[in-house]
Amino acid sequence: MASHDVPIGANPISLAQVNERAREIFRQIVESYLTTGEPVGSRNISRLITTPLSPASVRNVMADLEQLGLVYAPHTSAGRLPTELGLRFFVDALMEIGDLSDSDRRDMEAKVAGAGKSLDALLNEASGMLSGLTRAAGVVLTAKSNVRLKHIEFVRLEPERGLVVLVADDGQVENRIISLPLGLPGSALVEATNFLNAHIRGRTLAESRVELEKSLEQGRAEVDALTQKVVAAGLASWSGGDGEDRKLIVRGHANLLDDLHALADLERVRLLFDDLEAKRGVIDLLGRAEGAEGARIFIGSENKLFSLSGSSTIVAPYRDGAGRILGVIGVIGPTRLNYSRIVPMVDYTARMVSKMLAG
């Protein structure tokens, strides 16, 4: 894995604890699980491995692997499956990440190139493409607070209700309703609009907020108290609400329903849909993946967002032309995703989206 940086929390199992023979057997258990989802028994493994070993010897090694917490036996089955710790160990220490061919890259670029100019269309197209290629659900988490602002406007709707219209650098337009102080003159709305536009252009919401709070604190704001209230209400409506300043796009839900083996799988997918619907923990996931250089893998309960559904997430950050992180893009699926194939796809998609945003 050295050639592709997949930064993860430290794994408690070191490679030194697992000898060559045990590694080969463990690799067979994991690869069989990633292909079929089924436990694999010692008889089958003894036929698959290059070192000639009897099923009894294989069983002894499997018992050692079980003691390390890398595999477990579901029910009374004689076969073994990898644990979450086992999958993490495999991903960190043993997995060889594939690379994309030139034709793969060209196909991916062609699919996303037709997405038009808007950021939403580009992200929708990219996540839909990832979903189709990986047979998982494509996911994009984008932070509105990272958008650079171009213009803000206040419009009175009723005596005590107003509309804030915000235009971002990338052309996105959004509206929010705010409360207005009783008896506010029309001139205060014009003043608030002019004041904000003088301070926000080219800044993110977070930066604008800090800058304006500083101006107001130091008494440098050449606006009266009523106008200050409008300014504060406008900014609060834009940079408040945890869930509100994050946008979640999920494409390809149906892929998660393919290949279900049992009622337990159905329950897992139902819990995953609930999580996606409620957007629970989205900010946690976004924050943890944003700092990564390349793709980042969260397996099962390592990722609070999908811990109950036992799903895995492979995501990578995408950036604007100035190298600022705007959000993350990737896939969500069962823990038996084809990690070595999907990691380079997610990584390349994120770089492709960044390049298009910069261009």
Image (cartoon, rainbow, N blue to C red):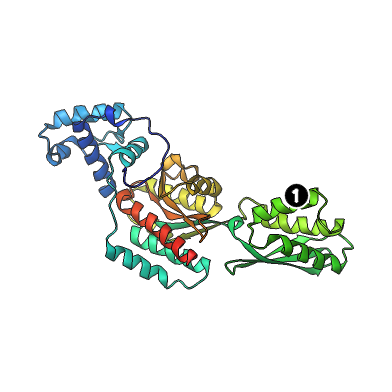
The reply, left or right, for residue 156 in relation to residue 294 is right
Q: Residue 47 in the image: state x and y as whole percent.
A: 12, 40
| Quarter location, residue 205 | bottom right
Residue displayed at 50% across by 53% down: 276
Closer to us: 35 or 176? 176
User: Which element type, helix, strand or loop, lies under badge 1?
Assistant: helix
Residue 89 x %, y %: 33, 37
Q: Dividing the picture into quarters, in which one does residue 84 lie?
A: top left
Which quadrant is home to the N terminus?
A: top left
Say which quarter of the image contains residue 105. bottom left
The amino acid pointed to by label 1 is Lys
Is residue 257 something that shows in the picture? no
Give percent across and percent down for residue 353.
Answer: 44, 62
Q: Is residue 150 visible?
A: yes
Quick one: 32 or 208, which is closer to the camera? 208
From the image, tell me which residue sits under label 1: 214
